[in-house]
Amino acid sequence: NKTIKGPATDVLRVGQLCLNEYLSGAIPPETITLQPGEKKYIYEKNWNIETCISAHIDVETTGEARFIVADLEPTDTLENLDSLVYYQPDGVHFSGTYDKMGIQYTLNLAGNQPERLTLGVANSGEWVVGDDARTGQRVENAGNFGVSHYITVTANEDMGVILNNRGGSFQGAVKWNDIVYNMPGKGTFSGTTTKAVVLGVIKKGETVTIEYILPNGSAAPTLIGFIPKTLW
């Protein structure tokens, strides 16, 4: 599965388009064959200052391979990769290879009161941990960017499901069973404790799986609320 969007100036919209296509799984797979020591691009494009590119790419290999994200001059070639220097950590932007691609949640809701699941909270122990190849240090993926959250919910009463982002500007997509749609449907959702978007309704006795990924460019944390029909 692979999706790449941009270059563009609207960071939130690019992240939403990218995530929607990734969750839909619409891009056919491709095969790249490498000889020992050979280098190949898996993506190459020119882009200008003040624009962004967003991507989700799933990769499977049959041998050891090294992946590099590089900022090259127009005249550079693949051979220039060996002479590049790492961007130094700035405490704001981070990179790493992390130990998890997905987190599973299983919820069985009684239906007699509201419930909530909060994702991407700082200092909660939820953020995945990995290694930064630049420094050799262990790092946290602040917000769990790129990590799928699979939320399987069984409701014992009709249950409305809402999403409330509290981290700032947000524009994403969600997969509800096999259906993918944008959230919100139009515009941008600003982080607040008083507004939410509706994800759907789980009928009494029904089980639904929601796949949520923090959209590139958006902010965490996100609260998913479950509201019984008696309180609608």
Image: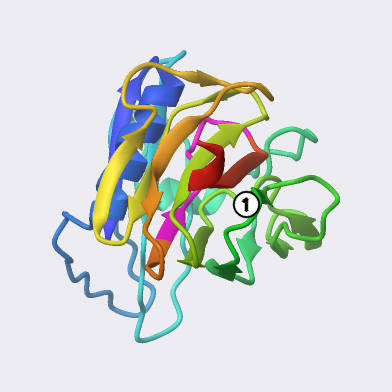
Residue at 66%, 52% in the rendered image: 113
Specify the quadrant that holds the N terminus. Answer: bottom left
Q: Is residue 196 magenta?
A: no
Residue 174 at x, y percent in the picture: 38, 46
Expressed as whole percent of the image width and height from the top left, the position of residue 50 reads: 46, 13
- Label 1: how many residues lie within 10 Å, few (<14), some (14-19) or many (20+)? many
Tell me: residue 82, above or below residue 58. Answer: above
| Frontmost residue, 88 versus 193 | 193
Estimate the x, y position of residue 112 in percent, counting from the top left: 62, 57
Toward which corner of the image does residue 204 lie, by quadrant? bottom left
Magenta span includes 218: yes
Where does label 1 land, which residue? 144
Residue at the (49%, 37%) spot, across then down: 216
Instruction: Give the vertical position of 158 relative to 62 (above or below).
Output: above
Q: Is residue 190 above or below residue 31?
A: above
Quadrant assignment, res 65:
bottom left
Q: Which residues are magenta?
A: 210-219
Furthest-right residue in this view: 123
Three-letter code, disc 1: Asn
Q: In the rendered image, is residue 214 in sight? A: no
- Give the side of residue 48 with respect to residue 223, left or right: left
Q: Main secondary structure of the magenta part?
A: loop
Instruction: Give left or right: position of 44 versus 215.
Output: left
